[in-house]
Amino acid sequence: MATITKKELIDRIAEQTANKRVVVKRIIQTFLDEIIDELGSGNRLEFRDFGVFESKNRAARVAQNPKTLERVSVPPKRTVKFKVGRLMKQRLQGNSSGSPPQSETQAGSTAGPVQPPTQFGT
């Protein structure tokens, strides 16, 4: 699995849109800054079919150091939660066409036997 940097995305978008790299960089950085500002203000960001960003408050808790088994107090903090949208979920599941997969009866498939669901905890 490769790591893609912001610079690489900027280069790709600049090439695809025939815009100058500095213009694309400024737009992307402004977009990211706006996301941070909105989440910092406690707002929810929804991008249809892509996903939803939300800031959540985590309560204070007592944890345990696994090495020393010493109890440690963890203070409350704000974190960001991301819920995957429909198109991204489909793409991640291997359906890149964007349409729902056809059932075996609709497709008229003669593929191999259907695998039974796996049993968890057995």
Image: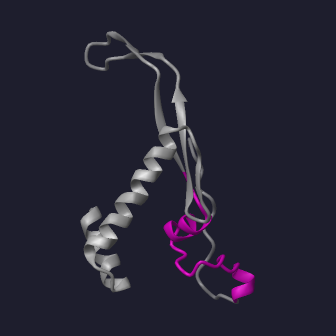
Q: Where the N terminus falls, by quadrant?
A: bottom left
Q: Is residue 102 magenta?
A: yes
Which residue occupies the foreground of this view, 79 or 25? 25
Residue 13 visible within the image: yes
Q: Where the C terminus falls, by quadrant?
A: top right
The magenta segment is: 83-107
Figure quadrant of residue 10: bottom left
Which residue occupies the foreground of this view, 85 or 105? 85
Specify whether 82 is left or right of 104.
Answer: left
Specify whether 4 is left or right of 34.
Answer: left
Image position of 28 with respect to 98: above or below: above
**Residue extending furthest toward the top:** 70
Q: How is the image coloured?
A: one colour
Q: Is residue 48 magenta?
A: no
Which residue occupies the foreground of this view, 103 or 12? 12
Image position of 5 with respect to 98: above or below: above
Figure quadrant of residue 56: top right
- The residue at the point 55 percent across, 38 percent down is 42
Specify whether 92 is left or right of 109.
Answer: left
Image coords of residue 71 (percent x, y): 37, 10
Figure quadrant of residue 69: top left
- The residue at the point 64 percent across, 79 percent down is 99
Number of numbered discs on residues: 0
Image coords of residue 117 (percent x, y): 62, 59
**Residue extending furthest toward the right:** 105
Specify whether 90 is left or right of 76.
Answer: right
Image coords of residue 103 (percent x, y): 70, 78
Image coords of residue 11 (percent x, y): 27, 75
- The residue at the point 51 percent across, 72 percent down is 94
